[in-house]
Image: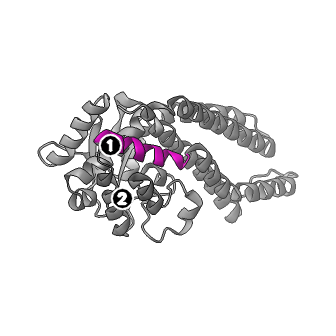
Amino acid sequence: MPATLYTHQAANIRKTWFLMTAFFLVVIALGWLFSQVWGNPAILYGAIIFAGLMNFFSYWYSDKIVIKLTGARPASRQEFFQLWNAVENLAITAGLPRPKVYVVDDPAPNAFATGRDAKHAVIAATTGLLQILDKTELEGVIAHELSHIGNRDMLVSTVAVVLVGFVTILSDIFLRSRLHGLNVGGRGRGNRAGGILLLLGLILAILAPIIAFLIKLAISRKREFLADASGALLTRYPEGLANALRKISAGGAPLRRATNATAHLFIANPFGAHGGLTKLFMTHPPVAERIKALLT
């Protein structure tokens, strides 16, 4: 197996701990602010418990959460024989345990890997991908995803889905409460509480692009180049992955259940040619650059 496959393991583990620690501190800080506004210290204790539980679930159950979010289902060997064979044979070549195999019933061609480590990994492909790729192209995509697993890219990627997703949900809940004029201050405290919460709401409204930027820091676009290179070395046929990327990018149609939280997991932009706000989440290098790197 190429040495490049495992070169970023330690860095990805550090990034995972950074994300979990940052999430813990942010939630506690928000809990402290809310406890001050409401004058209720129990809110702070609740925030500490919530942050701890979310870190626990994001690490141990993030793969199951991602599977639910993407609508993936287990793929049987009988129904998806070529996919099973590609995953099994390439996992043996890579010296990795065979990941669980899933499919997403969607005509948009794409694939992703998830799981906290190689023993709990999942590789999923859309039915659209399986329809348009030949054997060597599918092997190129699977080799790419196995490289993410071997390098533990999917650990930090999957944890980011859960943690960033919940920070966004919390911010949205708060902003909606302000828009609906929720009165959270008691008598004599309403004006002060309202002013503080309005300011806090503006701060939280700014968090969306900051969260996007943090994702870009945590999940470097270089990981895609690394996985492409490692996958090509695994199959010894870079043209297979290059051709697969051409077909995937030409698909154009967005993945039905793609979200900004899960976009970085996929082998290519899941929002199609017109990604809109996805430009904030530039976790994928341009396909043309990836193909050029593979073929030079």
- Residue at point 49%, 42% (across, down): 157
Mark 1, secondary structure of its residue: helix
| Secondary structure mostly seen in the magenta stretch | helix
Question: Residue pushed farthest front?
Answer: 296
- List the residue tagged with mark 1: 143
Range covered by the magenta-colored residues:
220-235
In the image, residue 242 lies in the stretch drawn in magenta: no
* First in residue order: circle 1 vs circle 2: 1
User: Percent from the top left, x then y, of residue 250?
Assistant: 35, 68
Kindly identify which numbered label has been placed on residue 263: none
Quadrant holding the N terminus: top left
Residue nearest the observer in this picture, 245 or 16 = 245
User: Percent from the top left, x then y, of residue 258?
Assistant: 42, 58
User: Percent from the top left, x then y, of residue 229?
Assistant: 41, 45
Residue nearest the observer in this picture, 172 or 293 = 293
Alpha-carbon span between mark 1 and mark 2: 13 Å
**Is 29 displayed left or right of 243 in the figure?**
right
- List the residue tagged with mark 2: 245
